[in-house]
Amino acid sequence: TRAPIWRRRPGATASALLGAIAVVALLVRIWHVNDLGYNSDEAVYAGQGASIAHDPDLAPYFPVFRAHPLLFQSIVSIGYQAGWGDWYGRYASVAFGVLTVLLVYALGSLLYGRRAGLIAAGIMAIMPYHVVVTRQVLLDGPQTFFTTLTLYLIARYAASGRRSWLYAAGAGMGLAVLAKEPTILFVGAIYAFFALAPQVKVRFRDLVVAGAVMALTIVPYPLSIVFSHRTSTGGNFLAWQLFRRPNHSFLFYPTVVPVAMGLLVVAVAAAALVLRWRRGLWTWREPLLASWIAVPAVFFELWPVKGFQYLLPTAPAVAVLCAGGLVLAPRRL
């Protein structure tokens, strides 16, 4: 019997192609990356990083605790501690973007084979949606990296049945929440996956342990708020988000996000789900990817406030679904 795909080393050709994809991903993200100054959100997150680093020029103007957890801002603070200034933040975001491309290769290879992994990584490397966001000091790029890592770990659990992968997914989800708190929606996606894929067995006790691992990973942030006596900050932000006016119509996501992902990419991904169902190729893989896309998409569609980058964590699943559909075509195509 052949070893599972994740235990096989890529051949020289696959390694060379993946390296070329990574180079392209890097180039399109760093090309003229600092020609323009920070926008408003970038200034806030970079300013938080400067405050964490106790930068004497910026710390008086930017409080450490504002709206979101501080994982990425803490990474940005390294640049201010080292005296590198504002340029470091965008390069840190670029690094998360390129690493996400490599993760998408691993995920696609695990689910649909190495050829699909390379196609999916190629799609992510030049997808405008992902490129634009990961050229900025925004939380959504790191969030997407950690949600994709969690998705990969869940897939590893589904493929092997080893509960250690499920526990690791709990840690990955915790890190994703520390990057940006709306990630908690993907707990619902994981629940939907297990409900829709009964062939993947999971014990309630293992889910509890994974949830505990996630909670232990997240707990440093609320503890830091408590010890710094800034508990009102999170409450004020939540109240503002709940009661602020809608900023876009219900057509915003259906008309903007598919274009940013690539209309053909989205179309092939949707067609792949239908094709696999009709050909009897439907496995646990399709519910996993579909749940990863549908749960946050439905939530943010119903949520009055809409942001361009909010659905970025669904992009890797769309890319892998598209690649999984393309490998069904004759090899010469």
Image (spheres, helix red, strand yellow):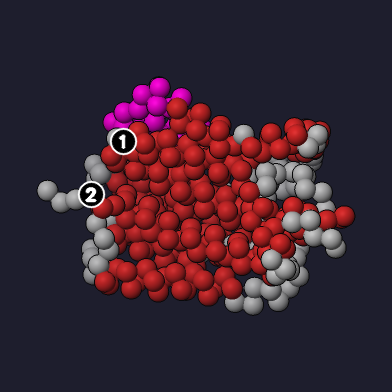
Measuring from the top left, give residue 80's x and y in whole percent.
72, 63
Q: Residue furthest left?
A: 1
The question of residue 205 being in magenta is answered with yes
Q: Which residue is mark 2?
A: 4
Please identify, in this view, whether the residue under mark 2 or under mark 1 is nearer the observer.
Answer: 1
Image quadrant in which you'd find residue 283: top left
For marks 2 and 1, the one nearer the N-term is 2
Which quadrant of the figure has residue 324? bottom left
- Left or right: 23 as drawn, with respect to 119: right
Label 2 crowd bin: few (<14), some (14–19), many (20+), radius 10 Å: few
Which residue is nearer to you in this view: 12 or 134?
A: 12
Residue pictured at 59% horizontal, 41% vertical = 177
Considering every residue shown, the one lying at the far top of the view is 204
- Range covered by the magenta-colored residues: 188-208
Q: Which mark is residue 172?
A: none
Residue 296 visible here: no
Q: Amino acid at mark 1?
A: Arg
Against 129, residue 281 (above or below) is: above
Residue in the picture at 59% in, 37% down: 218
- In three-dimensional space, the C-alpha distance between marks 2 and 1, rounded to whole angstroms, equals 14 Å
Is 30 inside the magenta-drawn segment? no
Residue 48 location (% of width, % of height): 75, 53
Magenta segment main secondary structure:
helix
Task: Report the residue at 23% width, 63% height from top.
Answer: 330
Coordinates of residue 319 in the picture (x, y in percent): 43, 56
Q: Is residue 38 above or below residue 61?
A: below
Residue 162's tag is 1
Q: Amino acid at mark 2?
A: Pro
